[in-house]
Amino acid sequence: MALSEKKSFWQKLKAWIDGEEILINADKYISTREKPELPHFAKHFSTENVRSNKKLYRLMSVFVSLVFIGIMLITVTHLPTFGEASNPSNNEVAERYLEQGIEETGAINFVAGMILDYRAFDTFGESNVLFLAVICVVMLLKRDSKNISAAEDQENAEDDVFDMEDLKLILKKGSKTIAPLVILYGIYVVLNGHLSPGGGFSGGSIIGAGLILYSAANGQKKMQTFFTFRTFTLISVACLLTYCGCKSYSFFTGANHVGYEIPKGVPGAILSSGFILPLNICVGLIVACTMYGFYALFTKGEI
Amino acid sequence: MSIREILAAVCIILGILVFCCSILGVYRLKYVLNRMHAAALGDTLGLFLVVLGLLILGKDMFHMLKYALIVIFFWVSSPIATHMIAKVELLTDKDYEERMRGK
């Protein structure tokens, strides 16, 4: 069907249903139309352009900052007065935590109950941020053939030889006694996070410190016999997924855990208080991996 | 005030004095190795005296053992850290010989 033909209503409808474009006088339109000009973003927003408009740029940045400051200040005026007795943070929330914290979360350590139950998604976000930070550092600093020159490679090799020749007797003897104790203490803090002060973040950083001590004394080569990049990614991803799975029971049981009885924590019994313990272990492992990952990447450029 | 309390107070005050000396040294001295010497004073002798005072005051055997553990941990870890810092300084400082002979 030629496009110049005048279509009947039914033809138009049929074409519309079939998905064809309907154009009146389409041939004429095609012959006379102009090609649309694509905007050249690169031309407008090049660095030279910004540099030549330095004054305007500064003015604009000051203006944008002022606008944001103004918005924030206006919001502040709507907040309740600090420290007033009738503020919601002063009566309802803290009272509920103290009175019903154990029944609702099962954790004896209220801080653990707060960060792993009431604000569990916040903690999940924090763990994700840690993981993302390590991944960004890996992208920037990990040693591979693309971002390292032959000279740097040789320098690293010389460093390795120097490291091997250096006996480091005192450090090795010291780390032999201290590092296992530090890691053991970290594990203790993680496992007792729901019963006593401590928890995933603090225990994880202690474990990370122990790993760093071991790595500094015995070298990256020995560390890689049990902790490679593969183990690092596996542990991090598995912990994040476990956290996600453990916490999604809130979705299936409803926001108030209807139909799910949270077992209460018992002082001294590690295997109590439901999901707080596995969540603490997940967070602790992620933090430990992150600490050691940063150290390894910044010193040698590989985990 | 019993003799035990007086003894503990003397130990703790001595320890705090040692800590003050070490802080003074850290700000007063200019070179890394000298400063490290001053800083290590507080970590070893000062900490030992303070914990000794607390040990004398302690009532429970378990708590006293924990205090002793703190001292042992610091006496093992702090000299190692100091040693490593000194080693790095010695290996990387180009003017080391000059500094040692000249002054």
Image: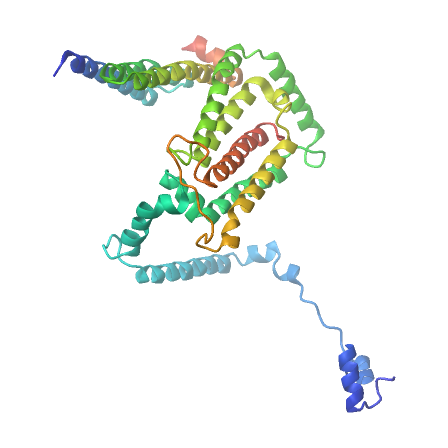
Task: Locate the N terminus of chain A and report the quarter of the image it occupies.
Answer: bottom right
Residue drawn at point x = 42 percent, y = 14 percent: B76
Say if residue B90 shows up in the picture. no
Residue placed farthest to the right in the image?
A: A1
* Among the 4 quarters of the image, the one containing residue B22: top left
* Among the 4 quarters of the image, the one containing residue A22: bottom right
Say if residue A97 shows up in the picture. yes
Residue drawn at point x = 32 percent, y = 23 percent: B27
Task: Locate the C terminus of chain A and report the quarter of the image it occupies.
Answer: top right
x and y percentages locating residue B73 in the rendered image:
40, 17
Residue drawn at point x = 44 percent, y = 36 percent: A272
Viewer-proximal residue, B28 or B9? B9
Image: A256 above or below A155 = below
Residue placed farthest to the top in the image?
A: B101
Image: A276 above or below B38 = below
- What is the basis of the colouring in this image? rainbow
